[in-house]
Image (cartoon, grey):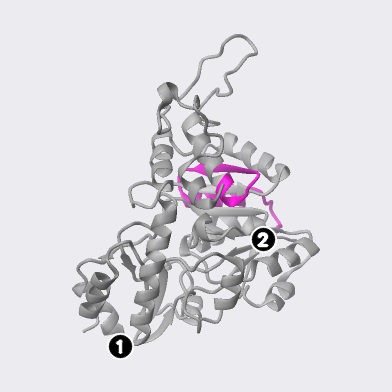
Amino acid sequence: MNIETLCVHSPNEDKIAHAYGAMTVPIFQTATFSHPGVGESTGYDYSRQSNPTRTELEESISALEGAYDTVATSTGMAACLLVLELFNSGDNIISQEDIYGGSTRLFNTLGTERGRTFTYVDTTKKENVLNAINKNTKAIFIETPSNPTMLVTDIKETAKIAKEHGLLLIVDNTFLSPYFQNPIKLGADIVIHSGTKYIAGHNDTLAGFVCSANADIAEKIRFMYKTVGPSLSPFDSFLVLRGLKTLAVRMDRVQENALKIANFLKNHKKITNVYYVGLPEHPGYDINKSQSRGFGGMIAFTTDTAKTALDAFEKIEIIKYAESLGGVESLITFPMIQTHADVPVEVRERLGITDKFLRLSVGIENADDLIKDLERALE
């Protein structure tokens, strides 16, 4: 099936999959399941480990990502923490320097407290990755495009480096979603999503995913999943499945809007830089185009002054000043004091995340209305 169809129909769907021919997966709101007899099971025992509603969601995400297996977690950060548990004291992880601030906070607190070390580099240049590898390095962690400055890392090239040195390649694919990009097919070993964002798509539930490329990784992830218990609830699994059905049409619309808005912003007298991978002048445009099917709906930009940026939050009407991204509503964020407040100041400033830097998650509203809202905000 094509990806648009896979968003709507789960891969194991058949006429008797749901009771009474229900078109929508039932919410199996139960903590435990009875057994037919001693030593027998229906396939489900306890919802921390597995649940029929969640299983359908996990199988759908695996089909979209080309994964061997997927686990659905309570949040995107729970997914990151689950992956982090693959590594032991003394292990080193090379990470893209520009990543979501919550990931940086996790790595620099719980990650290092357990004796693991993290080396932050610009992974868009392969020599930086090669120079960072040491005898204790076990993995490379990237976001592409990165959050929030939209850096593009070559997944195939990074996967090649990882395999040559016996490392795992972990890719946070939240910004493009499985509709536009499939890192496992490009050589990644693990893909992480904040399912809260584009996959669920309506700013009404939290979720995360860990997609494994092979049986060995999947077995380790499933064991920790069962043991630690960060599983997504049946009702939230239902909500994410409902959002998933419109992933294709939503992503097409936000990309269409984003292209129009990015072109508007780059010609505005009060905007000094626009970071959108769909603009041909973006330094990662060609690489992104070679490894994905689209550009997504995330834009970052810098204003001429800090006052322009601050005033914009007071003047916007349709676009909402809020954290998060990927919903049907357009949201604007001040990364310096919101999503990336825990990133060291010197790192933020080097990356350009200053008091003039804003991040825009483009929604599915009418593009002309959004542009008028930005015009008003930038007056």
Distance from the alpha carbon under mark 1 to that under mark 2:
39 Å
- Residue at position x 60%, y 9% in the image: 37
- Residue at position x 33%, y 88% in the image: 304
Residue 248 at what x, y percent from top left? 44, 55
Magenta stretch encompasses residue 249: no
Q: Is residue 235 left or right of residue 343?
A: left
Where on the picture, by quarter, is residue 26?
Answer: top left
Q: Which residue is mark 1?
A: 270
Magenta stretch encompasses residue 74: yes
Instruction: Decide: is 234 above or below 293.
Output: above
Residue 61 at what x, y percent from top left? 54, 46
Work out whether residue 293 or residue 345 is closer to the camera in this orientation and state it. Answer: 293
Q: Which mark is residue 186?
A: 2
- Residue at position x 65%, y 55% in the image: 184
Residue 95 in view = yes
- Residue at position x 40%, y 74% in the image: 259
Q: Amino acid at mark 1?
A: Lys
The range drawn in magenta is: 63-91
Q: Is residue 215 left or right of residue 281?
A: right
Q: Which mark is residue 351?
A: none
Characterize the local packing of mark 2: few (<14), some (14-19) or many (20 or more) Cα atoms within 10 angstroms: some
Work out whether residue 98 or residue 107 is closer to the camera in this orientation and state it. Answer: 98
Residue 17 at what x, y percent from top left? 50, 27
Instruction: Decide: is 348 above or below 31.
Output: below
Mark 1: which secondary structure?
A: loop
Residue 335 in view = no
Mark 2: which secondary structure?
A: helix
Characterize the local packing of mark 1: few (<14), some (14-19) or many (20 or more) Cα atoms within 10 angstroms: some
Where on the picture, by quarter, is residue 39?
Answer: top right
Work out whether residue 216 or residue 94 is closer to the camera in this orientation and state it. Answer: 216
Residue at the farthest top position: 37
